[in-house]
Image (cartoon, rainbow, N blue to C red):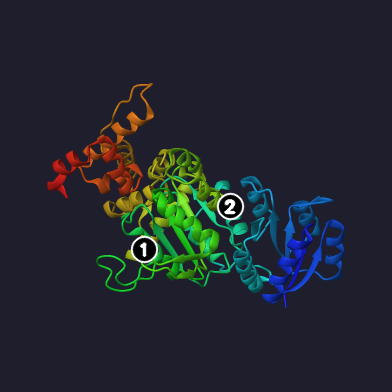
Amino acid sequence: MPHLLIIDDEPDTRELIAEIAVEEGYTVAQAGDVRQARIQVERHKPDVVLLDMQLPDGDGMELWKRMALPDCQVVFITGHSSVESAIEALRCGAADYLIKPIALRRLRGIFSELKTMAGSSREAGSQDAFSRIVGTSPAIQLLCAHIEKVAPTLATVLLVGESGTGKELAAEAIHLASPRHDKPFMAVNCGAISPNLIESELFGHEKGAFTGADRQHKGYFERADGGTLFLDEITEMSMDLQVRLLRVLETGRFMRVGTHEEIAADVRVVAATNRNPEQAVAKGSLREDLYHRLSVFPLELPPLRDREDDILLIANHFLQALNQEYGTAKRFSEDARKAMLTYPWPGNIRELRNYVYRSYILADDLIKGDFNSFSLESHSVGWGSEITVPVGVPLADANRQLILATLKQCGGVKKAAAEMLGISLKTLYNRLEEYGALSDVDESSSSLR
């Protein structure tokens, strides 16, 4: 049996936790302060520690660092939560972070999962967890180090980064480096699903729940059971759905559309956004309580311009994959390499990948510098056009000019304009509706779609 040590100065809390732990198959020891905790560790080294962050004779985090128990899992408990303390707890290697009064259902779930990990070396779930993340720059190495820290825990993760920085790859690495690596990994782009369908897609629906529901449908939460669910563009989710998502994260249960029967959700959620989440909260596109629940361990993905050492490495990675697929031996010229290093890559890795693919198609054996320079220059200014925005123009007006000009340059094709702007199609529709330009664009571009 795994052995649990509960370190908390409240006897009633200790007894309640101990009772549940015994039911879940643990042996239990208790300590009310730092001195008692040290005695208990000497008597029987624990597999799991539940540790109050504020003890009568010391700091819980400092105690954990001094105990130096490498094969032990720790869950911090606090009655005075903050985002900073949660982040610090996860950086200390905590498996989770509980707020008093403790949610007993969640506590049982933690015990169940930690039981399978107790006493192990907590090695990464898969040796290939980082195989798809290409790079050696300090920024990407720091990212991978943080992923390695948070992956074995139960914490929700919020990935923040510009469009094209590889947020889905980072989410997949978290999954592969976790104990859930042999279970499903499912990615959902919240901005690409119709607002009328996204609730059904996430939680499923019963037969007859709405018009067209001719059979039962299992949603992403059900299909990802035991694994990881990646929710991209979380700020594109409606406020009503954000409330439901928050409830699922807090209770670990959900209901299909058309029924009142709850289903357990054994799913680790990783969310992502290409916006500044605090600004999204201020603008009302992201609930503050959901933001704090998702960002237990926030990770910022560096843009490609901050990974200068990786640009050629990634470009060669894409080129070699194409060479292998088509049995060729194409290569970059020195001029091409210089052109890639001097370009700012506003579309990040996605833009670099598309650029390498275009270059590969048009080149013979050598991808020349003159072609690449021309391609980069023309792409960077939007097919040769530009707009001028005077200093002092409100940001909202500048955004409006840029969106409408880009849409016009794309011949009214919204999908192409959204990709060039680095936003979702749903966001583009919302902006056009705000500007009162949606119907005009549809009429002028109907012949092009």
Q: Position of residue 324 (x, y in %)?
A: 37, 64
Q: Position of residue 4 (x, y in %)?
A: 74, 69
Q: Mark 1 — residue? A: 201
Which of the 4 quarters of the picture holds residue 434?
top left
Tell me: 233 left or right of 130: left
Residue type at mark 2 is: Val
Please tell me how crowded label 2 is: few (under 14), some (14-19), or many (20+) other residues with Cα within 10 Å.
many
- Tell me which label, 2 or 1, sits earlier in the chain: 1
Give the alpha-carbon distance from disc 2 to disc 1, as whole Å: 25 Å
Q: Measuring 86% from the left and 70% from the top, which residue is drawn there?
A: 43
Please tell me how crowded label 1 is: few (under 14), some (14-19), or many (20+) other residues with Cα within 10 Å.
many
Q: Measuring 72% from the left and 66% from the top, which residue is drawn there?
A: 16
- Secondary structure under tag 1 reads helix
Residue 327 appears anywhere in the view? no
Tell me: 286 left or right of 434: right
Q: Measuring 43% from the left and 64% from the top, which residue is drawn there?
A: 186
Location of residue 420 with respect to 328 vertically, above or below: above
Q: Position of residue 291 (x, y in %)?
A: 51, 48
Q: Measuring 82% from the left and 71% from the top, which residue is drawn there?
A: 44
Location of residue 71 with respect to 394 vertically, above or below: below
Residue 301 appears anywhere in the view? yes
Circle on res. 296: 2
Which quadrant is the N terminus positioned in?
bottom right
- Front in this rendered view, residue 446 or 12: 12
Q: Residue furthest left?
A: 447
Residue type at mark 1 is: Glu
Circle on res. 238: none
Q: How many marks?
A: 2
Q: Position of residue 308 (x, y in %)?
A: 49, 43
- Secondary structure under tag 2 reads loop
